[in-house]
Amino acid sequence: MSKLLRGGRLASVRKDIANFTSSMKDDLVLSDAVININRAHVMMLMEQNIISHVTGVALLKALTSIFDKSLSSSSEDIHMAIEEAVLQETGEEIGGNLHIAKSRNDQIATAIRMQLRKHLLNSINNILKLQKSLLVTAENHINTIILEYTHLQPAQPVTFAHYLLSFIDNLERDLQRLLEAYKRVNFCPLGAGALATTSFKINRNYVAQLLGFDEVLENSIDAVGSRDFILETLSVFSILSINLSRLAEDLIVWSSMDFKVVELPDDFTSTSSIMPQKKNPEPLEIIRANASKVLGDFVASSSTLKGLPSTYNLDFQQITPNLWNSIGIVDVSLFILSELMPNLKLTNDVSDKALNSFVAATEIANFLTRKYEVPFRTAHKIVGALVKSLIANNLTFKDLTPEMIQNISKKITNRKIKVSVEQIYDCIDLHKIVNDHDAKGGPAPEEVKRALVERKKLLIQSQTKLSSLNQKLIKAQQTLESKTSSYLTSNLSSN
Amino acid sequence: MSKLLRGGRLASVRKDIANFTSSMKDDLVLSDAVININRAHVMMLMEQNIISHVTGVALLKALTSIFDKSLSSSSEDIHMAIEEAVLQETGEEIGGNLHIAKSRNDQIATAIRMQLRKHLLNSINNILKLQKSLLVTAENHINTIILEYTHLQPAQPVTFAHYLLSFIDNLERDLQRLLEAYKRVNFCPLGAGALATTSFKINRNYVAQLLGFDEVLENSIDAVGSRDFILETLSVFSILSINLSRLAEDLIVWSSMDFKVVELPDDFTSTSSIMPQKKNPEPLEIIRANASKVLGDFVASSSTLKGLPSTYNLDFQQITPNLWNSIGIVDVSLFILSELMPNLKLTNDVSDKALNSFVAATEIANFLTRKYEVPFRTAHKIVGALVKSLIANNLTFKDLTPEMIQNISKKITNRKIKVSVEQIYDCIDLHKIVNDHDAKGGPAPEEVKRALVERKKLLIQSQTKLSSLNQKLIKAQQTLESKTSSYLTSNLSSN
Amino acid sequence: MSKLLRGGRLASVRKDIANFTSSMKDDLVLSDAVININRAHVMMLMEQNIISHVTGVALLKALTSIFDKSLSSSSEDIHMAIEEAVLQETGEEIGGNLHIAKSRNDQIATAIRMQLRKHLLNSINNILKLQKSLLVTAENHINTIILEYTHLQPAQPVTFAHYLLSFIDNLERDLQRLLEAYKRVNFCPLGAGALATTSFKINRNYVAQLLGFDEVLENSIDAVGSRDFILETLSVFSILSINLSRLAEDLIVWSSMDFKVVELPDDFTSTSSIMPQKKNPEPLEIIRANASKVLGDFVASSSTLKGLPSTYNLDFQQITPNLWNSIGIVDVSLFILSELMPNLKLTNDVSDKALNSFVAATEIANFLTRKYEVPFRTAHKIVGALVKSLIANNLTFKDLTPEMIQNISKKITNRKIKVSVEQIYDCIDLHKIVNDHDAKGGPAPEEVKRALVERKKLLIQSQTKLSSLNQKLIKAQQTLESKTSSYLTSNLSSN
Amino acid sequence: MSKLLRGGRLASVRKDIANFTSSMKDDLVLSDAVININRAHVMMLMEQNIISHVTGVALLKALTSIFDKSLSSSSEDIHMAIEEAVLQETGEEIGGNLHIAKSRNDQIATAIRMQLRKHLLNSINNILKLQKSLLVTAENHINTIILEYTHLQPAQPVTFAHYLLSFIDNLERDLQRLLEAYKRVNFCPLGAGALATTSFKINRNYVAQLLGFDEVLENSIDAVGSRDFILETLSVFSILSINLSRLAEDLIVWSSMDFKVVELPDDFTSTSSIMPQKKNPEPLEIIRANASKVLGDFVASSSTLKGLPSTYNLDFQQITPNLWNSIGIVDVSLFILSELMPNLKLTNDVSDKALNSFVAATEIANFLTRKYEVPFRTAHKIVGALVKSLIANNLTFKDLTPEMIQNISKKITNRKIKVSVEQIYDCIDLHKIVNDHDAKGGPAPEEVKRALVERKKLLIQSQTKLSSLNQKLIKAQQTLESKTSSYLTSNLSSN
């Protein structure tokens, strides 16, 4: 209950209702950000001669001492908790000036953005770790052939490295989206006041710079009344988590007893309380489910904002926890997958399954087109009929003979096509098929090697970019600390 | 980490991954339910001679003693935590039999339903409280006239009691939906095992009865693999919370300085940190926002289940917390509104606003139709033109003269319509208008009184229904306790 | 553009903006309902002497003649289109009275409910058809053994009929929810007017009865301002479609080349444009995806209503198309599945897969507990270790010997357990396992037969219930028609 | 029904099921894109000597002639419809080669991206138009004072231009997000085949260039199996539409009879069918509701993709219509608002309302802090108490006297504060308050003018950027056309 703000306009509030509207519990993660905002703001007020040096230093001292204290959990929010703590330390004559020329509306928007910056950089780092984990795993599987599926039906042979590359590239777009979201988050709303800036002669650029922001978030109504940066962040995490859910789904299906494409390490499975034979892919199921949780957070936040009047409404307060919740969920999903990928065991030999599932069919059709100038659509029909007839006789491509091809192609096209046994073998040789699929982005080992080299370079570039973003924040923080020290020392010397 | 289940099929699990898949933190609310399930199950195993009396009693004793203990937070889930606690008390020779003929899959489904039953009855009670609060408020405002809006534009005068009745009736449907959901929740999955029941000769009906269920949830795949009861519950709460958000929106708009239809008590508002004149309707904004949170939980849960294979998948585990979260949110919204409604102050006199907003327009048109047999569509045009002309001259219906009507109706219909001054006064007399709207469900005080009497009866019926549902659960619990005591005593005497 | 309503208060509207706000395109499905509402309303106006017999009959005649006409697509909405058509036929002196004592607000709510009633009964019929299809299929598979999965890992053997029953029961709850939603839909808002009823002395009960409603939707603000019935309907369809998506997912996975549990008929699959061997389960993928569409419609509608002021807002107009869209989607999904189920081919022999996946493990543990009083948790460990050792040696339960059991159980429990070869065979005999799982709701053929008999009875009850609901609507419609004829004839004779 | 693909592997399909899985209706918008893809692909096949010049030219001729034909609506999809049309024209010997080295999987992904590019550029143009409309309106309202609200309670005076700037800036971020999404959309999947590229020696770069893409979408599994670009686009449109819904909500509230901040032109309102005085803001209500529809489309699409196996699944087909639907909705919302904004009438004088709502309170507190060094928190209390006392006596700041301030400040702080009457007048002078709020991003006319000049520059930059993106697509299309002509002519001459 904020005693600070009552007693003037409003009578005291009921405890149960104060609890209901209080955001204190959710605000605790913002505590450091809010203290730093107040420090930067006080420095600016001093520079602009809005408050005296003595008042400013006393406020800085009190603010700096709060870092180690536990704040009153019964406050209306983190802003009042910190102002109350400062007032307790300094008395109202000094502490009563902390809130000059700012409002909770601009302060909360600034604090969320500061906390979010850190989270975004951390999540970017987690993506880079997963990309690296996929890269390392891919390098061990450049020649490992797997059957890929469409519609969950065996389609064509590729290499496992080629499969892993698809997720490296997918994650690259998630990374880009996070970096672009970061750019829009790193704007400073402070100084926007309640919505109209202030009649005090403040310097918004200076505060923004002290807090490590790239720029001031200019228009003051926009600065306090916009939460599109939260929706954008949540949407990026939602899309990312859906990508991860699809990787999880692949691995759940592929590690099933029936598919047996991969085997999960014991570490990443659990057994049943009554079925001792079970080896359940539980962490992957959680990752799959978590994508829905992030989607739910996006919906909750979007539906909250939709149709709300512009500027600040308290509804905003209910959105922020969704943000932290979703980021936490995705971070741990990224971590678990990073740890899992290099420990997957691949099934050694897929040739039987390849035969049973006729994944060489496209290649035979391609061959007929290439060598005998059979129109592709005709070749497609011929091979379709071949597959049908083989299945009817419980045979596979291993049993395919030149005569069968000749007969069926004659029936369908009235051409005599004479294929040699060697040519058939060539067509159904998985390694040859994969090697021949060497178009840009294809599964051929040579092409995959080229791609991996490029992805490695990209990864290093991304790490450098991340590092420079991190450095900027660290430097700003260091400057804020050293300025605080200077002020506190200056005061000692002037005393 | 569940040591209990490993060491056989699987090697030990990593601590970080065990934490990731553990539901222990979320499961704690289910602890009592799981203990009771185990007690009922043990009694049945004894009755069916599946375990010996001595074993059974020892298990019951150990189970009963767990109520007071804190469970290991590092367990895989609540089921293993309790089994581990029993094993520690009894040793494996006894405790190793606790899990005969059941599985975590049926046990968790049973526990969620038991906990949900309690929550549903509690929420029903909260709805009844809000209905009562609305009723009591309505009885004080049977003659209080307000202007009602459509499209946020003033439409027609009604009584405030009539307005409140609309929410009583709205909530009545929410109540029905909750009762119907309860019916489907109160089925017992226990005995379904992992998905196929068991080869032990169990008695599912007996366990269901001991746990206060109405019936056995029969098909064992359905029993462990369905979560539609969670989706249904969440959808009902989502719809309910949207109804509440609309009530909150009305009050936010109506308590605005510009509308001034109602005044909120100081208790239910907050002021600004920099704008001392502000009186913000913060609890109502939270209630409005909370509807989005419940919608988010429904989406998260629905999207989790969509496309999942039937039977049990661990994705289920991520759904349950959404359920408790949403119920908690709606319960407190109901409570806050119950407390608020009787404390609203209504603006005394709406007659000026009524004149400025021409809400009597429909009544004048009706009058022209009724008295002068002007076709309604023609009357509508006449009055529309009247309003337009009055606005253009900065006048209101107070300034309306028989001549104006005559002139405009002549222009539009070529009829001479002679209306007296008294008739005009009658048409724009708000009390007369409201009294004349006495069709079933209308705002006329007489009709509202009739409706309130009926609603009171309905409320009492609902309270009786709720009470009988509560009683059934209490009785079952008492029976379970007394049976436990009997068993424990029988053992002492037989020793 | 509604010329009818302009010219009075408002200047003419722009064509592009009129198009933007017009609901005419979406309203066409409501055309019959709106005409019938007008007919019933006119009859009531005549009975109450609000309009003359001559006027009433002329209106009825005009209304009846509209059924065959195409309405102006440039109208603001269906209400204006029909009023305009009547006016064109009768002139304003007669037709101008059609809108006495009602509003578009109550009329649209009534029309949606009338159209929705029909849809709900139709969808209920579609559910019954699918239940019947599942029943018929189940009767052919009472002894067909399949392996059921949890976490997509083989769990235990059941019968296919048992599996199908789980969906019959699941659908039964969907059916109940639809019936309960129907109950709440079948209330009549007409007479609520814009929001305050009317000062004309109308008879709401009479109109409700003529239109086949169970009751009047009483409170007039509630009657025009509530759309919870749409949210409820959409939520029920969303839950239903999620159930169907899970059935679809099962069949997609089970018809994969790797699982080969079922084979889809050619009719229900498609091939690839380049991979001639493919047999893709396309209709099932659409059904799986459609559940998301319905969820999207629920979200769109919920988010639209959330935080809207009570009474009528035009936002409502955007909700109704979501309703029809989702119902259509679910209806066709139900139909496709009804057609598919009886045509599934089941893989004949699952015994090899059963051995490879050790699904008999639970039964062996149960056996050790039952026969040798090994505590279940100990038995679970023994069998877990057995499975691990067999896998390590590339063996299955077929190779299990009494000695292996003896050795491992000694290592784990220090007991000597002598099991005979026959007992092992018994434990891994799939038919015996299934037969022994004869608890209520279990997969044993005898239990399944009992359940199927009960479900058949239930199906007949449901069909009877549906039929009586249908009959009520048909009768009301017949009465309306015959009353119309009487009025039209009476007029002829009186002329 | 695709006869083309059946007859080989699969028996014929049922018509009802073929209709169910057909995407033909939704595909028609992609028809031009698919023809162009085929033309570019054929040119590449010729260049790479995969097909002969003669075959290639014949295919090009047939393809070019299809633009004017109506396609078979009974086809499985647009790909088969076009291939069938070509086959009809050329016979199988020629036309059967159209599908060499590509698949429907890469072709559909390419076609969607091509169509989406156009839509994105169009929507960007619509945003620019709305920004321009806001700019033009703002220039007319640089000195128009309005009261801004937080929590829907009057907060502080700003200028209307300052308010409009908040939406210009908000839209600027939407614009950036669309441009960034465009960047990720404009990658070419063609050549990825079904998922593994092809063993034909294709040139993916060449096709990408012919179709105006920036780059090849490299990894072939990613290329056919990713739809994150659709989710990203929908999320950007969802955020944008929520921004628009908040603008709509402001205008709905502000144009209400009670707020009367703005007046909507008659053109943009509708009246009631029974309440002739009504002037309802219907287009704005539709815009507000439409944000929910876009959110629903995002949810439907996200939930469809979540947990889907990687590579192509037919579920994808159900996502694309959501995309077009949402884009259409947002485009028209942007258009309506562009048309509306310059036509808003602002209420001339807000001074009475300003006094009644005490919006000068913050300024008086600021003044006490600035001039008398009253700590801000103390000043806040003093002014709060002043407001309370004035309200209690039915007074406003107009009635504020130096004595009142002196008395209350003495009571609260024990200071004597002597304020002059002139100083009070200064504090409550709305123009002075607004002028003094001249911090960066503030409402002061000078600051707003500066901002508007900058925004104009930005708008021109954006238009230039848009124009260059458009030009690139137009040029690519022209090149494709002229190459087609050359080929067709070359053929004539070679004939």
Image (cartoon, coloured by chain):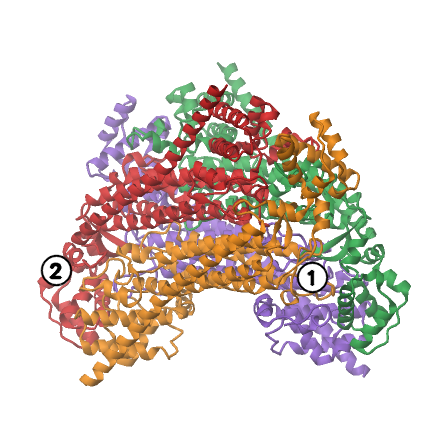
Chain colours: A red, B green, C purple, D orange
Looking at the rendered structure, the kind of residue marked 2 is: Asp
Disc 1 secondary structure class: helix
* Rendered image quadrant of residue D141: bottom right
Q: Residue at x 44, y 50 (%)?
A: B306
Residues packed near mark 1 inside 10 Å, few (<14), some (14 to 19) or many (20 plus): many
Chain letter of mark 2 equals: A
Q: Is residue A17 visible?
A: no
Residue B423 image position (x, y, % from top left): 88, 64
Quarter-of-image position of residue A276: top left
| Tag 2 residue | A426
Numbered disc 2: secondary structure: helix
Q: Position of residue B207 (x, y in %)?
A: 51, 34
Q: Which residue is mark 1?
A: C106
Q: Position of residue D139 (x, y in %)?
A: 56, 59
Q: Position of residue C248 (x, y in %)?
A: 40, 54
Residue type of the residue flagged with mark 1? Asp
